[in-house]
Amino acid sequence: MFLGFFLALRAAGVKASLREFLTLQEAMQQGLAGFDTEHFYYLARAILVKDERLLDKFDVVFAEHFKGILQPAPAGVDGVAPRELPREWLEKLAEKLLTEEEKAQIEALGGLDKLMETLRQRLEEQKGRHQGGNKWIGTAGTSPFGAHGFNPEGVSIGQEKGRNRKAVKVWSQRSFKNLAGDAELGTRNMKVALRRLRRFAREGAPEELDLAGTIGSTARNAGYLDLKMVPERHNAVKILLLLDIGGSMDEHIHLCEQLFTAARTEFKHLKHLYFHNCPYDSLYHDARMRRGDSMPTNDVLHKYDHTWKLIFVGDASMSPYELSAPGGAATFYNAETGQVWLQRLLDAYPKAVWINPTREQYWQHTHTIGTIRKMMDERMYGLTLGGLDAAMRQLMQ
Amino acid sequence: MRFEGTESFVATEDLKVAVNAAVALQRPLLIKGEPGTGKTVLAQEIARALGRDLLSWHIKSTTKAQQGLYEYDAVSRLRDSQLGDARVHDIGNYIVKGKLWEAFEADVAPVLLIDEIDKADIEFPNDLLLELDRMEFHVYETRQTIKARQRPVIVITSNNEKELPDAFLRRCFFHYIKFPDRETMERIVAVHYPGISQLLLREALTSFFELRDLPGLKKRPSTSEFLDWLKLLLAEDIGPELLRETSAAKLIPPLHGALLKNEQDVHLFERVAFMARRG
């Protein structure tokens, strides 16, 4: 009974277990739901969902699965069953990612594939340097190709810093400054905030006198002294810090340096790796992000298990393609989209937050911030003391 | 016997289904929700509605799972041994029963409230898995096994400060108390202040929900705070026209101290009120 529903729930990410499924069967056998679909909905919800963040997913699956069987949509779905998106909407999703004003700003060429195709043709056609104009690859024009332009779908070639900070591709190997760990000034406040993230554990050799334990065991021992020793307490929290570097992050570098310095002294187990805009199949040990100096993301996932807490530091501002399209990465060809990699990381590390140095009031103006924020289940915080504090609380939950 | 809410507690349909299912299938019921939505009160009301006793176990950050079962008072025994008390020979004299033991021993299965389970150490729920599942535990000192005569109705509340382990969650029924909508709120107020004037109630509710909708509030006022505020309004004999007052300097509701509990929120509200006045 309801096996299909159960499987659909699991597929949607509501990880109900077999045990809970059997409990539902038991409840149905006892006739707890009566013959009322609404009661069945409440009953199934109480048994199968254990986290209020998953309630919405449950509602969607429920409405989808019992569509047609239940004439009136169950309460809690706001009386409206979710509709399927028209096919062409999905196909055009990539284009839709750009805001209306961006589209109005300039008339762009077709999809990403078309863009790359045209670029290849132009590269073949073009000889010599070009500036201005609206077709040839050069600088400061409105053609989708070239640097320092304003075409939101543009491909930037050989530029140091993105002007609109949205280049779909940056075809040059950047070398950026390492986030140095010596910016000591002004990090105290951050350390205090980070200090929330402490989980003391006693590990290692017993060296400290356990006073309470000694008293207890002496009393149990009918008054004969029985000394107890325990290992020293220390912070056992493990942090995996992934830092966005380069491009639009340049203006936040000072703040990020401070955060990094504070984190380095505060945590004993801290592993930091770099990425540019969005993590893909490899992460870098060094902020210069040289190919040879990288670590496959899959190895990271295997080496650091789920007890590590994941902290992203990045402005999450990039071209929508870098998140959603294969081959959209700024520096190389990525077979799988940034979203896939991000989701993989999020699945591997249930404790994860995104710390964003962009000021919170500007978040709504960048589409990819919204997308990533949604993927993070709203666990995105500003790089302010209040934001850090909230992020650390979230990690400690 | 079914739980249908009581004259002093308004239960929504989904809450009733969850409670009745948990009682019928003898599973613990985990209740979450915003603070002040009546999580703790629910257990009292279930006990009243079902005619059972209520045992409350309030959890603190230092509470250990073992304390719910029993504690061995070794220090008393040590003292008694020094004084030559005869009681010292029976270790059973120094076993102090915990709430769970009491609940297991009762003649009529009581309602056991484990309040704010998220306050305790992160391992706390795991330490109670077997006890809640089989409803029995072993007393090591006296070598006896305590088994529940009847399975008590267990209500567990959580404020979401820590996440609970999956193994624990699998054994529970779960209900999230949503913040009541206007209609439910009216029913709740009717239960608490049956004689209240409709006009005052309408204005108070409007002010209250507007206040809750204010973006950026650090702590949004809850049902219980709204009830306190109403009580104050009644005590001070403040009329509905004062609440409706939208002229300058009156934008902040009277006696707002009952609703807004920190100064940033009061400042925020004043700022918004000021802007609204200008606009």
Image (cartoon, coloured by chain):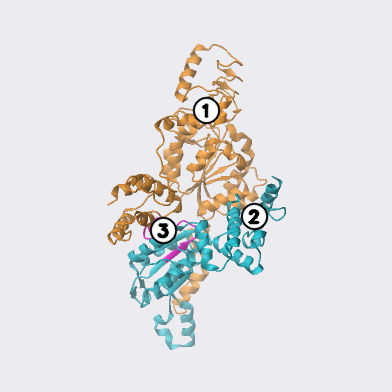
Chain-order first, disc 3 or disc 2: 3
- Front disc: 3 or 2: 3
Q: Are marks 3 and 1 in contact (CB under 8 Å)?
A: no
Q: Position of residue A207 (x, y in %)?
A: 51, 62
Residue matched to label 1: A168
Q: Is residue B216 left or right of residue B51?
A: right
Residue B14 visible in the shown view: yes
Question: In terms of image quadrants, where is residue B166?
Answer: bottom left
The image quadrant of residue B123 is bottom left
Residue range (magenta)? B155-172
Drawn colour of chain B? cyan
CA–CA distance between discs 3 and 1?
49 Å
Observer-nearest of A208 and B123:
B123
Asked if residue B159 can be seen in this view, the reply is no
Query: Which residue sits at x=43%, y=84%?
Result: B88
Q: The disc labelled 3 sits on which kind of residue?
A: Asp
* Badge 3 element: helix
* B167 inside magenta stretch: yes
> Residue drawn 39% across and 83% down?
B90
Q: Nearer the viewer, residue B245 or A80?
A: B245
Compared with residue B169, is residue A376 higher up or lower down, i.e. above or below? above
SS state under label 2: helix
Q: Position of residue B128 (x, y in %)?
A: 40, 65
Residue type at the position of mark 1 = Val
Label 3 belongs to which residue?
B14
Depth check, mark 1 against mark 2: the one in front is 2
Judged by depth in the image, the label closer to the viewer, 3 or 1, is 3
Image mark 3: chain: B
Crowd around label 2: few <14 · some 14–19 · many ≥20 (10 Å): some
Colour that chain A carries in the picture: orange
- Under tag 1, what secondary structure? loop
The residue carrying mark 2 is B265
